[in-house]
């Protein structure tokens, strides 16, 4: 059939009208990322028509229990008109307003989203946080702003037969020998083989536990029979001390670098019956992770345990030895981070470069959880 000019003109007009209608705003189910006119802006200048998230944890004015790995939990935004993927923007600031973190996290399924703040917090400091929803360059209104406080450092002490020393606040209740470096919020670093921190217990601990968190040393450590921790009676040459206890990480000079071993002497260094060694075993350390080193002793047993991350972490070394029936009773009872230089010289003294925090000495009981945490520690429970 032949088309007349009038019919062609009408048909063209209809096609043009349909094209214009299809291009009008509001005809698509997907929200436009284009910013609206200023008189269409939502609360706080928001450009995405979604509700503000509801903050859940930490609650406003809460004090958290750790200075790292704080979980920030936000309620998810939801609605029948939200058919597109939401990203949540977190904002964490110091009390002075300095931006600490500002990540964008995909909203999780369910009713809430969790993001873990990796930054090391300053003890007792205040922080603020808030969250908003975003999509394709547009953003919804901010949530309310919540404030939380980092944990306080409990005071370190020596009390009877118990010691707690956080070592994260630039000071110690022990006595420093040699060169050390204080790392605020982290711990104390032993800079040389002659470096150590020593403590004298007012009351001898015949049965007890001695533990601390350690990092910064491995098989490349400069030394031979390098000491992580030790105990003795009074002073003098620790090697031949009648109440010597040493826990060692063998350094690169030793024939098997990275080997762990411990020795305890229960009252007579000249009598083999009272000298007790744990097996020597090479352990796969690295100098980035924290490791719990812990010794426990009773009249008939001695244990050395090393765990990656904390008291509930992966066991790297664990050995229990039966000992003689003679009690461990040094007078005075002296505790060391590292060890004094003995007759073999500095190569057998402190493991240079190690960083230590959260020293704990006490009668037999569970190690507490500390503000600068044993990374995998559970809350304090004492037997």
Image (cartoon, rainbow, N blue to C red):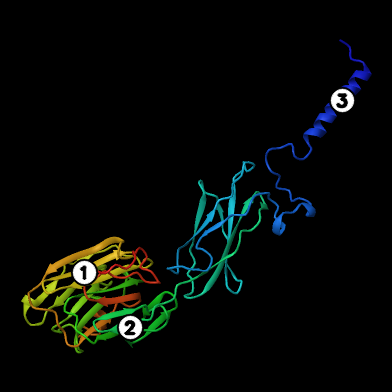
Find the distance from the CA under tag 2 to the CA under tag 3: 91 Å
Image quadrant containing the C terminus: bottom left
Residue at coordinates 83% horizontally, 27% vertically from top-left?
15
In the picture, measured across the screen, residue 42 lies left or right of residue 328, that is right
Residue 313 in view here:
yes
Q: Is residue 357 left or right of residue 5?
A: left
| Circle 3: element type | helix
| Along the viewing direction, whichever of 155 and 168 lies nearer the viewer | 155
Q: List x then y, in percent, for residue 123.
A: 47, 75
Which residue was labeled with disc 2?
157
The image's mark for residue 12 is 3
- Measured Cα–Cα span from mark 3 to mark 1: 90 Å
Residue displayed at 20% across by 70% down: 261
Residue contact between numbered discs 3 and 1, judged by CB atoms under 8 Å? no
Q: Position of residue 17 (x, y in %)?
A: 84, 30
Residue ID for mark 1? 304
Residue count near mark 3 (Cα–Cα under 10 Å), binned few <14, some 14–19, many ≥20: few
- Residue nearest the observer in this picture, 111 or 374: 111
Say whether disc 3 or disc 1 marks the residue closer to the N-terminus: 3
Looking at the rendered structure, the number of numbered marks drawn on it comes to 3
Which image quadrant for residue 25? top right
């Amino acid at each position: 059939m032949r088309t007349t000019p009038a019919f062609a003109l009408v048909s063209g007009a209809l096609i043009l009208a349909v094209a214009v209608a299809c291009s009008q705003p509001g005809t698509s189910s997907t929200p436009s990322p284009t910013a609206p006119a200023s008189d269409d802006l939502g609360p706080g200048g928001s450009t995405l028509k979604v509700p503000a998230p509801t903050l859940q944890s930490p609650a406003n004015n809460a004090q958290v229990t750790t200075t790292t790995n704080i979980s920030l939990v936000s309620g998810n935004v939801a609605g029948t008109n939200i058919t597109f993927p939401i990203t949540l923007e977190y904002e964490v600031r110091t009390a002075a307003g300095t931006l600490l973190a500002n990540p964008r996290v995909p909203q999780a399924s369910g009713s809430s989203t969790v993001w873990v703040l990796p930054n090391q917090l300053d003890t007792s400091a205040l922080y603020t946080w808030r969250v908003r929803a975003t999509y394709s360059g547009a953003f919804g209104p901010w949530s309310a702003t919540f404030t939380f406080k980092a944990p306080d450092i409990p005071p370190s002490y020596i009390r009877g037969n118990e010691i707690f020393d956080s070592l994260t606040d630039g000071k110690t209740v022990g006595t420093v020998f040699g060169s050390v470096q204080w790392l605020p919020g982290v711990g104390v670093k032993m800079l040389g083989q002659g470096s150590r921190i020593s403590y004298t217990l007012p009351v001898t601990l015949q049965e007890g536990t001695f533990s601390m968190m350690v990092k910064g040393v491995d098989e490349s450590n400069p030394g031979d029979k390098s000491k992580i921790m030790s105990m003795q009676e009074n002073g003098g040459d620790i090697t031949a001390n009648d109440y010597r206890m040493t826990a060692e990480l063998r350094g690169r000079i030793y024939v098997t670098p990275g080997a762990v071993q411990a020795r305890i002497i229960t009252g007579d260094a000249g009598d083999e019956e009272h000298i007790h060694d744990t097996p020597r075993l090479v352990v796969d350390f690295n100098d980035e992770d924290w490791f719990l080193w812990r010794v426990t002793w009773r009249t008939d047993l001695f244990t050395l345990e090393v765990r990656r991350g904390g008291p509930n972490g992966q066991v790297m070394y664990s050995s229990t030895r039966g000992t003689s029936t003679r009690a461990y009773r040094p007078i005075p009872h002296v505790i060391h981070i590292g060890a004094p230089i003995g007759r073999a010289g500095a190569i057998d003294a402190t493991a240079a470069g190690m960083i230590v925090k959260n020293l704990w000495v006490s009668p037999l009981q569970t190690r507490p959880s500390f503000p600068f945490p044993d990374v995998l520690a559970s809350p304090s429970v004492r037997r």
